[in-house]
Amino acid sequence: MPVRARPISSIMKLLCEHQGAGRAGGPPAGATGRGRCAFTLIELLVIVAIIMLLAGILVPSLGNVWEITRRAICSAHLRGMHTALALYCGENSGNFFPYRQKAEGGVLWYWGFEDTGAGAPEGARPIDQSKARLAPYITQIAEKTCCPSFPRDYQYLKPKFDKCGYGLAINRMMLAGVEPRRKWDQVGQPSQTVVWADSAQVNTWQAPASPSNPLIEEWYYLDNCRNQPANFHFRHAAQANAVFAGGSVRSLKPFWLDERCDGLVGRPEEPSSPSEVSSLLQIDK
Ligand SMILES: [Zn+2]
């Protein structure tokens, strides 16, 4: 037999009748033909306190759920970019792509083509991601190569292009032109070598950023050298997502964090050298 839900009005009526019945000496609800429904101030305060308590429990939990979701999306994007890079290398004799290359009418960055003819200012430079190196291997590349937790509406963000790019960066040693040149199958310990990770850097030298006005911007390669700005971004509950050459995605904890801006740009380990990449990025292990 199907169970019919009671309308809210009938539930309120029941509550009122219960309240009237429980009040010593009080008239029963409905005695005058119209049930009186009145809560005392203390009862209302108790209800408000319960609602606030539940909200206090649920709101942080929902925040955690959203962050877990964003982290999962980021991980999926990193795995997709790892697969796409492997496919690219497979079709190019194992070679990696260059960071940038001159092209007719502009510059072909590995994440897209920039038409430099218009002379657009920093923050509005046009980028065509359909021309990215990995575009043939990733559908919807503009969406599938971004980290959903990159702070696009952040008050300290300095945009570079007319649309936000990756928010993810590649191991600098996996760029063609970095000597000595390596190939995909020369990675010594795939399970110990980061390929892509959450990335951003603090800019103090390019307007509107300045030493007194540091701004955060998306970044495109990872090196973790002592003489270079930190370029890992620990945006997932103070951890950075990274995909390793072996295909696993892991969360990196910061070894050091830059206190400026959001305080989440940093290093996953101590740099071993002023100019060489740190251990997580070394290919020749
Ligand atoms: Zn991410």
Image (cartoon, rainbow, N blue to C red):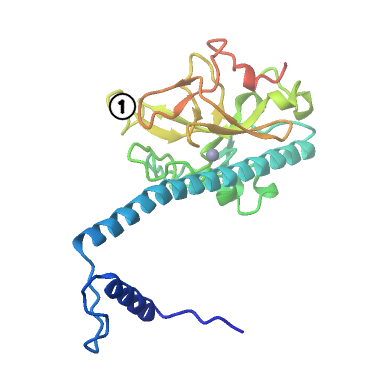
Which quarter of the image is occupied by the C terminus? Answer: top right
Circle 1 packing at 10 Å, graded few (<14), some (14-19), many (20+), is: few
* Residue sitting farthest toward the front: 25
Q: Position of residue 27 (x, y in %)?
A: 22, 79
Residue 227 visible in the snapshot? yes
Residue 105 visible in the snapshot? no
Q: Which residue was labeled with disc 1? A: 210
Q: What residue is at 56 percent from the left and 51 percent from the top?
A: 143
Q: What residue is at 32 percent from the left and 53 percent from the top?
A: 52
Q: What residue is at 48 percent from the left and 18 percent from the top?
A: 228
Ligand 1 quarter of the rendering:
top right
Which quarter of the image is occupied by the N terminus? Answer: bottom right
Residue nearest the observer in this picture, 142 or 198:
198
Instruction: Note whether ligand 1 is within 8 Å of mark 1.
Output: no
Residue nearest the observer in this picture, 190 or 25:
25
Q: Position of residue 128 (x, y in %)?
A: 54, 48
Is 114 situated left or right of 186 in this image? left
Q: What residue is at 25 percent from the left and 61 percent from the top?
A: 43
Disc 1 on helix, strand or loop? loop
| Three-letter code for the amino acid on which mark 1 is drawn | Ser
Residue nearest the observer in this picture, 249 or 198:
249
Against 235, residue 118 (above or below) is: below
